[in-house]
Image: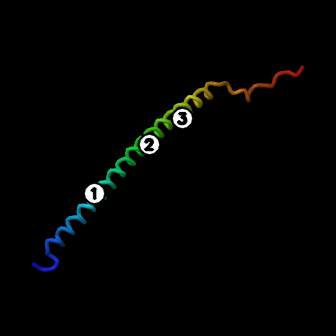
Amino acid sequence: MSQNQSPEHLLQRIDDLEMRITFLEDTVEVLNQQLAANTQEFSLARQAMQVMHQRLEQMQSSESLMKDFSDETPPPHY
Protein backbone atom coordinates (compact mmCIF):
# COMPACT_ATOMS: atom_id res chain seq x y z
CA MET A 1 0.00 0.00 0.00
CA SER A 2 1.13 3.50 -0.69
CA GLN A 3 1.35 6.15 2.02
CA ASN A 4 -1.91 7.80 0.89
CA GLN A 5 -3.77 4.51 1.04
CA SER A 6 -2.70 3.38 4.48
CA PRO A 7 -5.50 2.29 6.81
CA GLU A 8 -4.71 5.16 9.18
CA HIS A 9 -4.99 7.66 6.35
CA LEU A 10 -8.28 6.17 5.18
CA LEU A 11 -9.65 6.24 8.73
CA GLN A 12 -8.62 9.89 9.04
CA ARG A 13 -10.40 10.71 5.78
CA ILE A 14 -13.52 8.92 7.01
CA ASP A 15 -13.39 10.87 10.28
CA ASP A 16 -13.00 14.14 8.37
CA LEU A 17 -15.94 13.30 6.13
CA GLU A 18 -18.10 12.36 9.11
CA MET A 19 -17.28 15.68 10.78
CA ARG A 20 -18.14 17.55 7.59
CA ILE A 21 -21.44 15.68 7.31
CA THR A 22 -22.28 16.49 10.93
CA PHE A 23 -21.47 20.16 10.38
CA LEU A 24 -23.58 20.26 7.21
CA GLU A 25 -26.50 18.54 8.95
CA ASP A 26 -26.35 21.11 11.74
CA THR A 27 -26.19 23.93 9.21
CA VAL A 28 -29.20 22.56 7.33
CA GLU A 29 -31.16 22.32 10.59
CA VAL A 30 -30.33 25.92 11.56
CA LEU A 31 -31.28 27.15 8.09
CA ASN A 32 -34.50 25.15 8.18
CA GLN A 33 -35.47 26.71 11.52
CA GLN A 34 -34.69 30.19 10.20
CA LEU A 35 -36.72 29.53 7.07
CA ALA A 36 -39.67 28.41 9.18
CA ALA A 37 -39.43 31.55 11.32
CA ASN A 38 -39.18 33.77 8.24
CA THR A 39 -42.15 32.03 6.64
CA GLN A 40 -44.27 32.63 9.74
CA GLU A 41 -43.16 36.27 9.96
CA PHE A 42 -43.94 36.79 6.27
CA SER A 43 -47.39 35.27 6.75
CA LEU A 44 -48.13 37.62 9.65
CA ALA A 45 -46.92 40.61 7.64
CA ARG A 46 -49.13 39.58 4.71
CA GLN A 47 -52.16 39.32 7.00
CA ALA A 48 -51.45 42.75 8.47
CA MET A 49 -51.12 44.22 4.99
CA GLN A 50 -54.45 42.69 3.96
CA VAL A 51 -56.15 44.19 7.02
CA MET A 52 -54.66 47.61 6.27
CA HIS A 53 -55.77 47.32 2.64
CA GLN A 54 -59.33 46.49 3.72
CA ARG A 55 -59.38 49.42 6.13
CA LEU A 56 -58.07 51.76 3.45
CA GLU A 57 -60.79 50.60 1.06
CA GLN A 58 -63.40 51.15 3.78
CA MET A 59 -62.09 54.64 4.44
CA GLN A 60 -62.11 55.49 0.75
CA SER A 61 -65.65 54.17 0.27
CA SER A 62 -66.91 56.09 3.33
CA GLU A 63 -65.25 59.27 2.06
CA SER A 64 -66.98 58.88 -1.30
CA LEU A 65 -70.33 58.59 0.49
CA MET A 66 -69.77 61.80 2.42
CA LYS A 67 -71.28 64.92 0.93
CA ASP A 68 -68.89 67.47 -0.47
CA PHE A 69 -69.63 70.67 1.46
CA SER A 70 -67.23 72.82 -0.50
CA ASP A 71 -69.90 73.57 -3.14
CA GLU A 72 -72.47 74.82 -0.64
CA THR A 73 -72.87 78.45 0.27
CA PRO A 74 -71.58 79.27 3.72
CA PRO A 75 -74.18 79.64 6.45
CA PRO A 76 -75.31 83.15 7.34
CA HIS A 77 -73.46 84.86 10.13
CA TYR A 78 -75.40 85.85 13.20
**If you read the primary sequence from the N terminus, does the residue marked by circle 2 or circle 3 appear first?**
2
Residue lying farthest to the top in this orientation: 78
Q: Residue at x 54, y 35 (%)?
A: 52
Check disc 3 and report its element: helix, strand or loop. Answer: helix
Amino acid type for the residue under numbered disc 3: Met
| Other-residue count near label 2 (Cα within 10 Å), few / some / many at <14 / 14–19 / ≥20 | few
The residue that mark 3 highlights is 52
Disc 1 vs disc 3: which is toward the camera?
A: 1
Check disc 2 and report its element: helix, strand or loop. Answer: helix
Which one is in front, 20 or 6? 6
- In the picture, the disc for residue 22 is 1
Distance between the alpha carbons at the discs numbered 1 and 3: 45 Å
Residue 39, position as x, y percentages in the image:
40, 43
- Position of 40 compared to 74: left or right? left
Residue lying farthest to the front in this orientation: 8
**If you read the primary sequence from the N terminus, does the residue marked by circle 1 or circle 3 appear first?**
1
Which one is in front, 44 or 9? 9
| Image quarter hosting the N terminus | bottom left
Corner quadrant of residue 55? top right
Amino acid type for the residue under numbered disc 2: Phe
Residue 63, position as x, y percentages in the image:
62, 28
Corner quadrant of residue 15? bottom left
Q: Residue at x 61, y 24 (%)?
A: 65
Distance between the alpha carbons at the discs numbered 2 and 1: 30 Å
Corner quadrant of residue 20? bottom left
Q: Residue at x 59, y 31 (%)?
A: 60
Check disc 1 and report its element: helix, strand or loop. Answer: helix
Which one is in front, 4 or 29? 4
- In the picture, the disc for residue 42 is 2
Which one is in front, 1 or 76? 1
Q: Are marks 1 and 3 in contact (CB under 8 Å)?
A: no
